Image: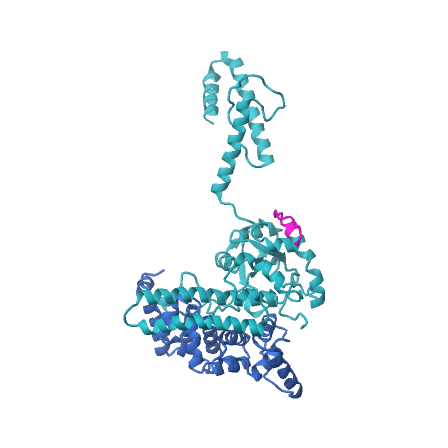
Chain colours: A blue, B cyan
């Protein structure tokens, strides 16, 4: 570890995260942006950091990145949301900020990691209040198709979503609907 | 149920080692070079895929190496997995996710019999039920971690954020209650979801929670083993590939029955790590026992009974291994022979000092 790095770590968690956010905002390099976003998303895995990430409005940062064109940024941002959305405060914040819609949009990404993070995020964001939104008909329909995917990880997640978060009625309804419509949201490539 | 596709037993994109990132700013550099990657609960798994194992028949050594980090539930070679020449690919399933995490961190990129291991998570080998449990464990973990946290914050910061954190604390309880009720409603699935976290009970509660057996693909996820739901419920009790592979490794678990094994996961002694101090204590205990027997007068080596008190012999060291004990006693006998022969050849002068010295040395031993 370099001396400089040690100094920076001693600045403390908040300052370090602040440094990351600042770099993310000021940097011109798309590469650095991706790296920093990945850093932040990985920090979002540890509940110790939640308080700081909220202070630094990293949740908004993640939500903003969901609508980027760069697929890597989207993948990292939804990964970050997936990591922190179980926390009650974070969950409320995301629901309040109308975060469900952009997460649902991620289901139609061609990047399979993005899709899987989105499925898990939707499960974790489901509350009695948000259920209407997170298990809307198009979502259930999407999960029905994912559950037939050759990708075992994706099909497992979709099955859990259908079995644990949707009522049999909802699944039936979606099944009937998908019989009539030929086109849906395409499956992610590999 | 979908046919097992390329997700199982095949190569996944996330198995490939990504290039290390060398363009990081100085302050973001870690101790070890790493690729740019975000880990989520979806990428983690109790299953580890180990690539780059030299094809030298070192499965036992490999499994022992991994067992240092936690109990292993299953392991097997993935013969069909494309590997580099002269290397093999193995799949190891830990009992706990945390063990897999530590093992991956410690053993990825480590040298093993002259080649570098590449260790990665292999969540595509999970069954639906295993994935479900993984997601629920994360939910429980966050609930525990953040509820502690909230109390802590409330205690610590009294002045400025009082309202915010207090609010969140108040909201927290009703929400978790409400949500587990929802889980039970829609899911009608897992009774353990409402219970407090009880790792040791999980296996048995899982058994009762799954009457259909549909999610119990205990089989080792080779495509040819992954049959349909109906079959798996039957094969659940047999699960031959598993027990066979467990025996092969020379591990001490007796293949009683899988159900039993699962109910007492902590007792099956698979690859349990025994600290050195424990081993030493055990050895000392055995030695003491041996000494006692000597005092009583029953020679443990010969069966003849000696009447009357016997001088305590030099304590015999139990090496915990038959072959070691044999060689130890051979050496001991040889020394005895030499010791007996020394007084006979006492007359000679030049050897005299030498033999005396060797005698002393032996005493020191």
Dividing the picture into quadrants, the one containing residue A98 is bottom left
Quarter of the figure with the N terminus of chain B: bottom right
Pinpoint residue A121: horizontal percent, then vertical percent: 50, 75
| Residue at figure coordinates x 62%, y 51% from the top left | B57
Residue B363 in the figure: left or right of residue B191: left
Q: Quadrant of residue B236?
A: bottom right
Q: Position of residue B72 (x, y in %)?
A: 57, 54
Q: Is residue B348 left or right of residue A13?
A: right
Question: Residue B104 at what x, y percent from top left?
Answer: 51, 59
Q: Nearer the viewer, residue B264 or B319?
A: B264
Residue at 51% from the left image edge and 70% from the top image edge: B180
Residue B289 shows up from this direction: yes
Q: Is residue A73 above or below residue B109?
A: below
Is A131 on the left or on the right of B209, as rendered?
left
Extreme residue in the left direction: B159
Residue B49 lies in the magenta stretch: no
Position in image of residue A17 (x %, y %): 35, 70
B253 in magenta: yes
Say whether residue A37 is visible. Answer: no
Give the magenta-colored segment's residue range. B246-257
**Foreground: B238 or A11?**
B238
Residue sitting at x 48%, y 59%: B105
């Amino acid at each position: 570890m370099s001396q400089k790095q040690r100094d920076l770590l001693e600045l403390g968690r908040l300052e370090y995260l602040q440094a990351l956010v600042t770099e993310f905002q000021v940097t011109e390099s798309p590469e650095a942006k991706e790296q920093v976003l990945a850093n932040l998303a990985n920090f979002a895995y540890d509940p110790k950091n939640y308080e700081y990430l909220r202070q630094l409005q990293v949740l908004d940062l993640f939500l903003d990145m969901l609508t980027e064109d760069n697929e890597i940024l989207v993948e990292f941002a939804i990964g970050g949301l997936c990591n922190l959305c179980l926390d009650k405060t974070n969950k409320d914040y995301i629901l309040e900020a109308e975060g469900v819609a952009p997460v649902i949009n991620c289901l139609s990404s061609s990047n399979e990691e993005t899709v899987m993070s989105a499925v898990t995020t939707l499960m974790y964001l489901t509350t009695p209040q948000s259920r209407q939104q997170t298990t809307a008909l198009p979502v259930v329909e999407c999960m029905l198709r994912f559950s037939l995917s050759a990708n075992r990880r994706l099909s497992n997640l979709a099955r859990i979503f259908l079995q644990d978060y949707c009522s049999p009625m909802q699944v039936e309804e979606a099944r009937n609907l998908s019989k009539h419509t030929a086109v849906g949201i395409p499956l992610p490539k590999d | 149920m979908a046919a097992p596709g390329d997700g199982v037993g095949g190569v996944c994109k996330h198995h490939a080692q990504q290039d290390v990132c060398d363009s990081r700013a100085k302050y973001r550099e870690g101790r070890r070079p790493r690729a740019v990657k975000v880990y989520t609960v979806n990428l983690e798994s109790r299953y580890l895929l180990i690539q780059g194992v030299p094809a030298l028949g070192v499965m036992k050594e490999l499994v022992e190496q991994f067992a240092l980090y936690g109990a292993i539930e299953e392991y097997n070679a993935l013969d069909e997995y494309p590997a580099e020449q002269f290397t093999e690919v193995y799949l190891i399933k830990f009992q706990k996710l945390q063990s897999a995490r530590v093992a991956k961190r410690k053993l990825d990129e480590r040298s093993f019999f002259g080649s570098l291991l590449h260790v990665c998570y292999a969540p595509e080998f999970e069954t639906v039920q295993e994935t479900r449990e993984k997601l629920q464990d994360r939910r429980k973990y966050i609930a525990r971690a953040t509820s502690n946290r909230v109390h802590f914050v409330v205690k610590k910061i009294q002045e400025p954020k009082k309202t915010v954190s207090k609010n969140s604390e108040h909201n927290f309880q009703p929400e978790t209650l409400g949500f587990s009720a929802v889980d039970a409603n829609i899911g009608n699935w897992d009774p353990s979801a409402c219970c407090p976290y009880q790792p040791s009970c999980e296996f048995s509660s899982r058994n009762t929670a799954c009457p259909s057996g549909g999610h119990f693909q205990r089989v080792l996820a080779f495509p040819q083993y992954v049959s349909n739901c109906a079959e798996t419920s039957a094969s659940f009790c047999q699960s031959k590939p598993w027990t066979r592979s467990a025996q092969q490794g020379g591990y001490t678990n007796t293949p009683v029955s899988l159900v039993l094994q699962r109910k007492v996961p902590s007792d099956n002694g698979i690859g349990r790590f025994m600290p050195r101090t424990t081993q030493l204590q055990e050895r000392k205990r055995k030695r003491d026992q041996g000494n006692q027997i000597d005092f009583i007068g029953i020679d443990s080596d010969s069966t003849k009974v000696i009447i009357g008190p016997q001088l305590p012999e030099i304590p015999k060291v139990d090496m915990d291994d038959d072959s070691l004990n044999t060689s130890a006693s051979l050496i001991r006998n040889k020394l005895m022979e030499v010791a007996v022969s020394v007084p006979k050849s006492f007359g000679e002068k030049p050897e005299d000092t030498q033999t005396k010295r060797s005698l002393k040395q032996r005493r020191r031993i």
